[in-house]
Image: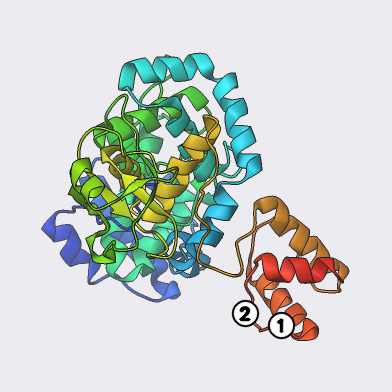
Amino acid sequence: MIAPMKKALLPAFALLALSALPASAASFQSCLAAIGARAQAAGVSPAVFARQTNGLQPDMTVIDAMNKQPEFKTAIWDYMAGLVDAQRVADGKQMMSKYASVLAGVQRRYGVDPATVVAVWGVESNYGESPGTRPLVQSLATLSCYGGRRQGYFMGELIATLKIIQRGDVNPDHLVGSWAGAFGNTQFMPSTFLRLAVDGDGDGRRDVVDSVPDALASTANYLAHSGWQPGARWGYEVRLPASFKPGLAGRTRKRALSAWTAMGVTRTDGSPLSGGGSAGILLPAGPRGPAFVVFRNFDAIYAYNAAESYALAIATLSDRIKGGGPIVTPWPTDDPGLSRAQRKELQALLIRAGYDVGTPDGSIGDKTIEAIKGAERRLGLPVTGHPGLTILQALRKG
């Protein structure tokens, strides 16, 4: 998802109007009427607005989803285990082969490493299999009326969605996506689509939903605009000396590689640091976990969705797709995260033990968490609800 935390820049009159928008579900239609005036002022025809909003009802589940973003709530080792697993790596390699000619053209035009583009696709929608199911207009209208301090941002995205529909780039019936309005193979926010989506297949339309070439080219264009440096690496895992001061770490606290080398930082195999330009040291799990040198291209990935865990998932997945190995340094936990295959196995074992988790699909929701807690109580384990290796191994033993 592209930067859902960023605020839209709206005219002052629009921001002032938001303070008067109603906060009750019964007043949803009044809220829509106020948004309709803003949409018309922004160039959306009354007919398009009416077709998309007549009879529309709010979906209040998006408000709950807004407060449960995994990039900010989930432990890094759980987040990474679910996104950079063997299946996603294998599927990514297949997509690299299937779309080799498209990706070659994208690289020539935008200078972005094909594996990184494919990794974004894999993390954002599992290569198009999971682009989201929420109708954009409904979700964004709900958030425009009930999104609290972020109403202004979401109203801008709703108006951008209506402009996309008016332009005819994407089939309106296919404009479904995440709770926040990100849509398509690589989950563009509507305003970002208007700015940076491109026609990758030459049909005259920018369709990141039904055209994989459009989605891949648009993603590369986004990364290029975010400062991607052709031919350079995003970074790599490193080994820190015992004397390293964690306060020196930080993605934006960049120094010359020679400065890090002087402190005793090396690659994990002990070889010297290499690469061009300055770099920061990233400690996603603190000083006891893996450490990474990160360059400008890591920042370009970060710009796609402002979370370091997200950027690290894409960066490491891209390396794995190209044949690289997994992260060397263990995460600082005694209960490592599970791959999607292991999560499905966990759910199947919970069902066999008599717990209701719904369909064993590898997605950890409230039912699975409550079932884990029940199983932990029965097995005499600390009750955490954590879908990690500890409960999986315990259930395997019966």
Which residue is rendered at x = 44% and y = 26% of the image? 114
- Residue 212 on image: x %, y %: 51, 26
Looking at the rendered structure, the secondary structure element under dot 2 is loop
The CA distance from mark 1 to mark 2 is: 9 Å
Q: Residues within 10 Å of mark 1 (few under 14, many from 20)?
A: some
- Residue 374 on image: x %, y %: 74, 81
Q: Give the residue type that dot 2 points to.
A: Thr
Would residue 371 be found to the left or right of residue 11 on screen? right
Looking at the rendered structure, the secondary structure element under dot 1 is loop
Quadrant into which the C terminus falls = bottom right
Q: Give the residue type that dot 1 points to.
A: Leu
Q: Residues within 10 Å of mark 2 (few under 14, many from 20)?
A: some
Question: Which residue is identified by label 1?
Answer: 381
Question: Which residue is identified by label 2?
Answer: 384
Residue extending furthest left? 12
Which residue is rendered at x = 47% and y = 47% of the image? 313
- Residue 80 on image: x %, y %: 52, 54
The disc placed on residue 248 is: none
Q: Is residue 203 visible?
A: no
**Mark 1 vs mark 2: in front:** 1
- Does the residue at mark 1 contact the one at mark 2 (Cβ under 8 Å)? yes
- Residue 87 on image: x %, y %: 66, 41
